Image: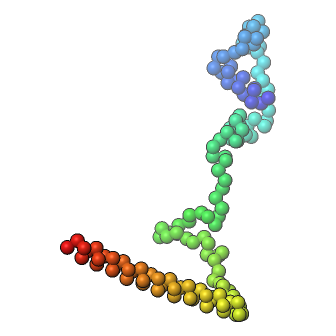
C-alpha cells in the first residue's frame, strides 16, 4: 500500500492524475484535496524496495566464494597459499603394504615386467637401426 501511495504522490507531482480523481476532485478544488497520510515508517527505509524478485537478477544466483578458494595477495603481490592448513605430510611408510608372501610375489612380478619392457625397448631400437641401414644401402 505504501508503494502505491508513493507512486500516486509522484504522479501528482508530475501532473498526471487518473480520470476518476480528476472528475471527483475537480469540484472540490486544489485546496480541498486530501493528501494521503504519511506514516512514520516511510522515512526509515534507506534502500529502494525491489519490485522484481531476486531470481531475476543474474548476480543473485552466483554463490559466494569459499574462504579457502579466494585469491589473496600480500603486500609484495605474492599469492598467499590458502591450503597450507589442509596439507599434511604423510609418513613414507603409509603407502607400503605390509610384508607377506603375496606382496613379495607381486613385487617380483612387477620387477620382472619392468626388466622385460626395458629389454623390449632396446630390441626395438636395434631393429629400427638395422632397418634404417638397409633402406639407406638400398637407395645407393
**Observer-nearest of 78 and 110:** 110
Taking the view exactly as shown, the residue that stands out farthest to the left is 140
Q: Is residue 106 above or below residue 14?
A: below
Tell me which residue sits at (72%, 38%) in the image: 53
Residue 121 at x, y = what percent?
44, 81
**Observer-nearest of 29 and 13:** 13
Q: Is residue 74 above or below residue 97?
A: above
Q: Quadrant of the C terminus?
A: bottom left
Which image quadrant for residue 56?
top right
Q: Is residue 109 left or right of residue 2?
A: left
**Observer-nearest of 14 and 33:** 14
Tell me which residue sits at (60%, 70%) in the image: 82
Taking the view exactly as shown, the residue that stands out farthest to the top is 27
Tell me which residue sits at (75%, 7%) in the image: 23
* Scheme of colours in the image: rainbow
Residue 130 at x, y = what percent?
33, 80
Q: From this viewpoint, is residue 28 visible? A: no
**Observer-nearest of 75 and 37:** 75
Which image quadrant for residue 139?
bottom left
Which image quadrant for residue 18?
top right
Tell me which residue sits at (49%, 70%) in the image: 78
Residue 112 at x, y = what percent?
56, 88
Q: Is residue 70 left or right of residue 137?
A: right
Amino acid at each position: 500500500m505504501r508503494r502505491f501511495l508513493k507512486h500516486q504522490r509522484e504522479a501528482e507531482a508530475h501532473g498526471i492524475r487518473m480520470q476518476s480523481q480528476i472528475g471527483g476532485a475537480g469540484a472540490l478544488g486544489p485546496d480541498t484535496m486530501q493528501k494521503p497520510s504519511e506514516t512514520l515508517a516511510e522515512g526509515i527505509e534507506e534502500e529502494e524496495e525491489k519490485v522484481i524478485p531476486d531470481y531475476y537478477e543474474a548476480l543473485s544466483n552466483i554463490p559466494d566464494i569459499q574462504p579457502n578458494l579466494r585469491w589473496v595477495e600480500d603486500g609484495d603481490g605474492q599469492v598467499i597459499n590458502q591450503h597450507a592448513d589442509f596439507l599434511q605430510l604423510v609418513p613414507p611408510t603409509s603407502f607400503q603394504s605390509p610384508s607377506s608372501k603375496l606382496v613379495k610375489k607381486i613385487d617380483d612380478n612387477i620387477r620382472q615386467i619392468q626388466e622385460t619392457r626395458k629389454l623390449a625397448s632396446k630390441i626395438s631400437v636395434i631393429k629400427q637401426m638395422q632397418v634404417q641401414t638397409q633402406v639407406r644401402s638400398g637407395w645407393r
